[in-house]
Image (cartoon, rainbow, N blue to C red):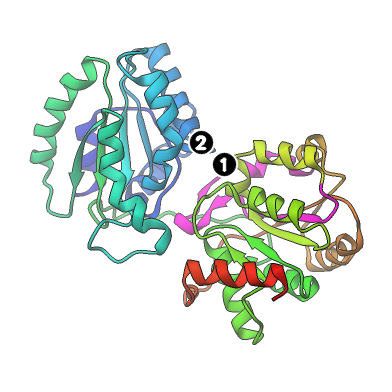
């Protein structure tokens, strides 16, 4: 089904969400049609944030909003759906559009497998009636479903469309780019050249894939790295947990701007704990690049001031490799919580692979390394 028909059937004029590659057609349509427009389209920090924005929209207008997300974000909406939107509380209607990663029977990455199994079950448990859209779903079929759903929405309940791979199509192209010069994979190469035998915790998405391939190219062990293949937004908290319990190790966190924004309170917690052995690096391309390149709000933020306000002892921003190398060498020898923002371009090489070890193998090797076995 082409996305124009899908949007027409929904009949809504306000969308908010977190981008998903499974919903790339919808995301690109929204960017081409609205861009980022507070009256029609807002990309939020996380899925709970979207749901609350949607609630505010309904309270102010009486109209039905749409929240889009990958199914990994269902966990973030459980609280606002159950305690805010539910018809036993405020009865706020909302249409959820959920990209179905890890659908049973469809090959996907390990972090999506269990989430895929429980995608519709979670919606059922939240009393959100849901309909699966596949490649063979017609606009007429969707109209019939939407006629029924309009009655459900009018009663103050929520509904969801679960979107299978390639179910939505869009012919127009969108180019996502910025003016930054440094390439993320090269940035990570520079980080690895300084970290030596120090442990690294890397964020979900292409950054971890690039770190894995850099180790392969260097004939280095993967034992030094914990690759956070899921749990977007929690990478720095994982690194913090390691740093607290391994005070004699310099622990490096390779994070992304989308991840850092998703659960930003993590910075305040890290700053309050203030471990002297942790370096938090945020590679900022101001984009959700792994799922298509849609923008984050990081281009308009002063990440350094935020880190300092949260309690990081040392925080800097760099936009070139000379400064990056100088700062990496400096923070390696500093006994304080450090933060480096690295301004980065959008894009990765087309032949970028994926880790050839399993998530369990990665965990076990990393834990053995930390024990120095």
Q: Quadrant of residue 321?
A: bottom right
Image height check: is 155 above or below 246? above
Label 2 neighbour load within 10 Å: few <14, some 14-19, many 20+: many
**Residue at x 18% of width, y 51% of height:** 134
92 vs 264, left or right, is: left
| 142 relative to 175, above or below | above
Q: Earlier in the sequence, mark 1 or mark 2?
A: 2
Give the residue pinned by disc 1: 262
The residue drawn where x is 22% and y is 14% is: 155
Q: Is residue 80 visible?
A: yes
- Let me know if residue 11 is in the magenta part: no
Q: Nearer the viewer, residue 181 or 103?
A: 103
* Left or right, 194 with reference to 161: right
Foreground mark, 1 or 2? 1
- Residue 72 or residue 362, whichever sits in front: 362
Q: Is residue 291 magenta?
A: yes
> Dot 1 lies on which element?
helix
- Residue bounds of the magenta highlight: 275-304
Q: Looking at the image, which is closer to me, 12 or 354?
A: 354
Q: Nearer the viewer, residue 100 or 275?
A: 275
The residue that appears at 50% across and 31% down in the rendered structure is 49
Question: How many discs mark residues in the rendered view?
Answer: 2
- The x, y position of residue 185, in whole percent, is 63, 70
Mark 2 secondary-structure assignment: loop
Report which residue position mark 2 lands on.
44
């Amino acid at each position: 089904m082409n996305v124009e028909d899908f949007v027409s059937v929904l009949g809504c004029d306000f969308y908010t969400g977190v981008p998903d590659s499974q919903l790339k057609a919808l995301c690109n349509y929204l960017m081409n049609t609205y861009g980022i427009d507070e009256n029609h389209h807002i990309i939020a920090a996380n899925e709970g944030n979207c749901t609350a924005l949607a609630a505010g929209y309904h309270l102010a207008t009486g109209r039905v909003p749409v929240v889009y997300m990958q199914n990994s974000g269902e966990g973030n909406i459980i609280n606002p759906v159950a305690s805010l939107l539910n018809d036993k509380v405020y009865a706020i209607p909302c249409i959820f559009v959920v990209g179905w990663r890890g659908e049973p029977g469809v090959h996907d990455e390990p972090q999506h497998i269990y989430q895929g199994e429980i995608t519709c079950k979670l919606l059922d448990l939240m009393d959100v009636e849901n309909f699966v859209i596949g490649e063979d779903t017609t606009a007429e079929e969707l109209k019939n479903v939407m006629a029924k759903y309009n009655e459900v929405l009018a009663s103050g309940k929520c509904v969801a469309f679960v979107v299978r791979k390639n179910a939505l199509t869009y012919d127009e192209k969108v180019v996502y780019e910025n003016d930054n010069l440094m390439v993320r994979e090269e940035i990570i190469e520079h980080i690895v050249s300084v970290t030596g035998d120090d442990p690294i915790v890397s964020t979900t998405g292409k950054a971890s894939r690039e770190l894995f391939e850099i180790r392969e190219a260097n004939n280095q062990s993967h034992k030094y790295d914990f690759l956070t293949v899921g749990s977007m937004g929690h990478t720095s908290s994982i690194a913090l947990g390691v740093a607290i319990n391994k005070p004699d190790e310099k622990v490096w966190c390779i994070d992304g701007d989308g991840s850092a924004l998703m659960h930003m309170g993590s910075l305040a917690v890290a700053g309050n704990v203030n471990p002297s052995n942790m370096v938090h690096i945020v590679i900022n391309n101001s984009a959700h690049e792994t799922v298509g390149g849609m923008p984050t709000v990081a281009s308009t933020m002063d990440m350094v001031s935020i880190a300092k306000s949260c309690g990081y002892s040392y925080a800097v921003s760099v936009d070139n490799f000379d400064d990056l190398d100088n700062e990496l060498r400096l923070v390696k020898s500093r006994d304080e919580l450090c933060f480096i923002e690295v301004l980065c371009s959008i894009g990765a090489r087309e032949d970028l692979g994926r880790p050839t070890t399993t998530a369990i193998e990665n965990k076990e090797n990393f834990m053995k390394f930390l024990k120095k076995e």
